[in-house]
Image: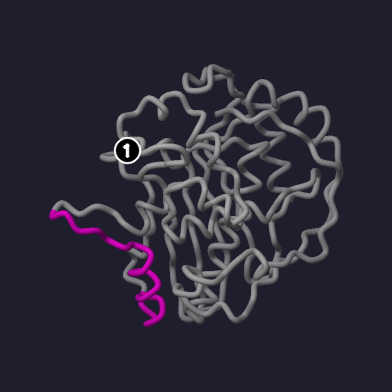
Amino acid sequence: MRQYLNLCQRIVDEGTWVENERTGKRCLTVINADLTYDVEKGEFPLITTRKSFWKAAIAELLGYLRGYDNAADFRALGAKTWDANANENSAWLNNPHRKGHDDMGRVYGVQGRRWQKPNGGTLDQLQKIVDDLNRGIDDRGEILTFYNPGEFELGCLRPCMHTHTFSLLGDKLYLTSYQRSCDVPLGLNFNQVQVYTLLALMAQITNKQPGQAYHKIINAHIYEDQLPLMRDVQLKREPFPSPKLEINPDIKSLRDLETWVTMDDFKVTGYECHEPIRYPFSV
């Protein structure tokens, strides 16, 4: 929690105003931020200085792991996060590759589960990583990437959290996640939850002990219409202790994650928080 607040304060104090062409708004921006989440100790990085909706973040992650490409599938899991980008992004609405309502195109999990090979086949990056880790293998390339510049025009949004690298030391699994761009008031809480949960899930289904998750953000920003709420409201609040995330121990394989897992298999305990803050969302 302190890491989050320190980053927010750094942006307020040191940020530079940058115009954003996609949204037509300015962003107060800093370059390079590093956060660490101690999954081994169970320190779930859920924001407490405002009410945070962790279920949607984990539901979205689950959709990525399944390779979903349709906003309706994410909604069925409990995440409405792709509704706007799939159906309100003017550039995507006018894109000839869009297949219709709710179509997201070849973004995020599609690349992770069905990366197109030059010969016409596909590569399942996630399955390869799970297979290696199950055998105790770390070839220094246990990398899950959603970033495919050759197919940017085939999706509604370039990935922000784009690459996850898993590292195995003995029986302890670590994760380093890279993010090119982060809407700190709204997006970072989602991203923190997802990085932590991804390591916890991957360790569980490969029978490893989770270590630390390292989260590197390149461009961290606060939109100009979010700044007063961050500066004058959220940063004035004192955080509560970190809650705990409980994951159903019956989840034992990637196949389980692909088939029967729902949000009922996740539970957060000990969560105290301040009142919600309605930050503007920029499409």
> Helix, strand or loop at disc 1?
helix
Horizontal arrangement in the rendering, residue 166 relative to residue 118 (left or right):
right
Whether 130 is drawn above or below 235: the answer is: below
Whether 228 is drawn above or below 246: the answer is: above
Residue for point 56% across, 61% down: 213
Residue for point 47% across, 19% down: 21
Horizontal arrangement in the rendering, residue 46 relative to residue 258 (left or right):
right
Residue for point 52% across, 80% down: 252
**Residue at label 1?**
154
Q: Callout 1 environment at 10 Å: few (<14), some (14 to 19), or many (20+)?
A: some
User: Residue lying farthest front?
Assistant: 100
**Which one is in front, 283 or 97?**
97
Horizontal arrangement in the rendering, residue 210 relative to residue 240 (left or right):
left
Q: Is residue 130 magenta?
A: yes
- Residue 28 in percent (x, y) is at 61, 24
Residue for point 32% across, 34% down: 153
Horizontal arrangement in the rendering, residue 143 relative to residue 206 (left or right):
left
Q: Which quadrant of the view contains residue 11?
A: top right
Whether 16 is drawn above or below 2: the answer is: above
**Which one is in front, 167 or 266?**
266
- Residue 104 in percent (x, y) is at 43, 41
Q: Which residues are magenta?
A: 119-137
- Give the residue type that dot 1 points to: Leu
